[in-house]
Image (spheres, helix red, strand yellow):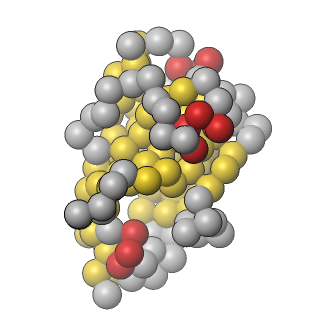
């Protein structure tokens, strides 16, 4: 099992930036692709970004492309989400999770239990 702890959320004005972190433990972190997801109030959880286990490949949802960047540090068992040019519609609880491939993560398939997430609120 993979244990995941997200952090780094907060309240920011539109146009601002935040950097989210996800610390993983349990199964061999570096063997899995990692992804970020978000769930806005009243909406279903959606895919945001994913990165291969080597870090050489990434995919970002169209809604965040050019503004968000996913990265990872396997030595620290941590994956990051740099969020720039934030918009009010980015307001959500952000979660991370893992699976074998980016394609699986895009489909919403994950191997870990969902953690508490980290809240991001963007004011206009």
Q: Which residue appears at 32% of the width and 68% of the height?
A: 91
Tell me: 20 left or right of 124. right
Q: Examine the image and state in which quarter residue 3 appears.
A: top left
Q: Residue 31, image x and y in percent?
A: 62, 18
Lateral position of residue 19 relative to residue 59, left or right: left
Q: Which quarter of the rendering shows the N terminus? A: top left
Residue at horizontal 56 percent and vertical 50 percent from the top: 49
The residue sitting at the right extreme is 56
Q: Please, which residue is most extreme toward the bottom here?
A: 124
Comparing 14 with 41, the one in front is 41
In the figure, 52 relative to 119: above or below? Answer: above
User: Which quarter of the figure is the C terminus placed in?
Assistant: bottom left
The answer to whether any part of residue 77 appears in the image is yes
Is residue 39 positioned above or below 4 on the image? below
Residue 73 appears in view: no
Number of marks present in the image shown: 0
Q: In the picture provided, is 22 more to the left or to the right than 31?
A: left
The x and y percentages for residue 67 are: 58, 69
The correct choice, above or below, for 32 with respect to 70 in the image is: above
Horizontal side, residue 102 vs residue 47: left or right: right
Residue 48, position in %: x, y? Answer: 51, 54
55 w.r.t. 90: above or below:
above
Q: Residue 85 location in percent, x, y?
A: 51, 76
Q: Residue at x 37, y 44 (%)?
A: 95
Q: Residue at x 31, y 33 (%)?
A: 114
> Along the line of sight, which residue is nearer the eye, 52 or 43?
43
């Amino acid at each position: 099992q993979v244990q995941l702890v997200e952090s780094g959320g907060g309240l920011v004005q539109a146009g601002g930036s935040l950097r989210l972190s996800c610390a993983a433990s349990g199964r061999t972190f570096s063997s899995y692709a990692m992804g970020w997801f978000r769930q806005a109030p009243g909406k279903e959880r959606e895919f945001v970004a994913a990165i291969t286990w080597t870090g050489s490949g990434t995919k970002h949802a169209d809604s965040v492309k050019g503004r968000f960047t996913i990265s990872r540090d396997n030595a620290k068992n941590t994956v990051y989400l740099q969020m720039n040019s934030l918009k009010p519609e980015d307001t959500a609880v952000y979660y991370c999770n893992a699976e074998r491939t980016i394609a699986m993560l895009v489909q919403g398939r994950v191997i870990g239990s969902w953690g508490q997430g980290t809240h991001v609120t963007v004011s206009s």
